[in-house]
Image (cartoon, helix red, strand yellow):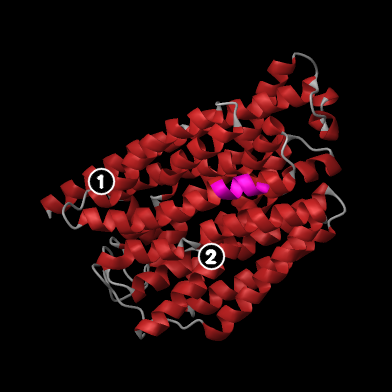
Amino acid sequence: MTQRDRAVALLLLASLNAFGFIDRVVVALVAEKIKAEFLVSDLEIGLLGGTAFALVNTLASVPIARLAEYARRSSVTAGFLLLGSVFTALMAASASFTQLLGARLGMAVGSAATEAPPHSMISDMYPPEKRASAISIFMLGVPVASLLGSFLGGAIAENYSWRSTFLFFGVAGGAISLLCILFLKEPARVTVAPAIEAGGKPSAWQVLTAMMGSSTIRFLLMGVTCISLGSFGVNTFLPAFFSRSYGLDAAQAGLVFGIISGFASLVGTLLGGFASEHFARRDQRWLLGFPALGSVIGAPLFVIGLVSGQLAIAIPVMLAGSFFFYTAMGPAIATLHGNLDSWSRATGSALFLLIVHLVGQGAGPPLVGTVSDTASSMIYGGDFAAQCAGAAGQVPGSACAAASAGGLQMAIGIFAMFFALGGIALFFAARARHRAEAAA
């Protein structure tokens, strides 16, 4: 591929990743409106936003990655995004929570191809020393999705309806997938420093065995999984937190969410890729050590902003803490792919992300929802579930609203500390990698 072909491919892959990620977070933008219309609890919102999606998404990602090892990766990832976009639009027509959940599962299958196959393509497009920054540029789709989704999604929901939000993003995602089908080129597969013998296409079990045989990958998996648990658990309820604690409407809460999550991930993703590569030229331990240090610093900063009680303090302090939460993924995938070859990287990414997302997105939102419901009930003192269901729990100034806000704040604060635990695990991954290279 020429330099121009690589630039176009990376731009298209980042756009594709953006709409794959919007499918993950769009429920958070309209959660309060869905909750009021269908009279569901925070736990059920967590299941819709997290567990139901994550179970199907992660289980579908492995067979899709295996398909990508044998077929054109560009066609696989674009085709599945088109499928997911159709189901995103169909969510707008849901007449019940059950129908909404069914369409959500279709979205999950479609977005299952927007990470692992592109990871494999990028590792064949760029040499090892440039992979962390290239993957970080690809990961810019995530903050772009957060910003675009938060600003547009919240505004559409507030001025039209939550159904219009799903319809808009479904149509837009379909357009991006068609552009990828037409213009995204497939890179040649190039084997670089394989940990698995070249000359064949290893099975998923062989890839998993090779990964788990490395202490670096084991600690890496622990660290990124903890960060994912904090990220999906916190972000699913962050717009709701600002609505409950500060009385913001859907558009205003979406704007604040976009500033904190979207802008922080935009800066953090680039910082993680380029700064980690820069420091790693002097000492390879910094490739993972930089995001490790950032996660440990960022978690307490975020919590300080969360409990500040003043919007003018909460936004900048939570933003400062959030910068560090998004530095890990580029260096993590670059480290993972350094242990795999061209015929196993899509499968390796899928298996890695299966665990990360199954725990992070699958368990994070419903656990935060459960802790929120439990803490809210304790604060309220009565039958919170019966007396504060649906719109009754959103009446400004009521005991229900105060209990709901306090319970959610407590739940988010607890799960934000998983970022610090993830940073500690990444530190051990960096040390294990250094020892393995010294012993080689």
* Quadrant location, the C terminus: bottom left
Secondary structure beneath disc 2?
helix
Q: Which residues are magenta?
A: 254-259
Near mark 1 (Cα within 10 A), the count class, few <14, some 14-19 or many ≥20, is: many
Task: Say what amino acid the circle numbered 2 marks.
Answer: Asn
Question: What is the x, y in percent for residue 394?
Answer: 80, 32
Q: Residue at x 61, y 28 (%)?
A: 409
From the viewer's perspective, tell me whether residue 15 is left or right of residue 150. left
* Quadrant location, the N terminus: bottom left
Q: Is residue 238 above or below residue 181?
A: above
Near mark 2 (Cα within 10 A), the count class, few <14, some 14-19 or many ≥20, is: many
Q: Quadrant of residue 340?
A: bottom left
Residue located beneath label 1 in the image: 430
Question: What is the x, y in percent for residue 412?
Answer: 57, 32
**Which secondary structure class fits the magenta region best?**
helix
Q: Residue at x 66, y 24 (%)?
A: 406
Question: 51 and 163: which one is in front?
Answer: 163
Q: Is residue 185 above or below residue 205?
A: below
Q: Residue at x 27, y 67 (%)?
A: 128
Q: Is residue 46 visible?
A: yes
Q: Is residue 70 magenta?
A: no
From the viewer's perspective, tell me whether residue 257 is left or right of residue 278. right
> Mark 2 vs mark 1: which is more N-terminal?
2
Task: Say what amino acid the circle numbered 1 marks.
Answer: Ala
Residue located beneath label 2 in the image: 17
Question: What is the x, y in percent for residue 104?
Answer: 71, 55
Select label 2 or label 1 by which is in front: 2
Question: 58 and 232: which one is in front?
Answer: 232
Give residue 337's mark.
none
Q: How many marks?
A: 2
Q: Is residue 112 visible?
A: no
Secondary structure beneath disc 1?
helix
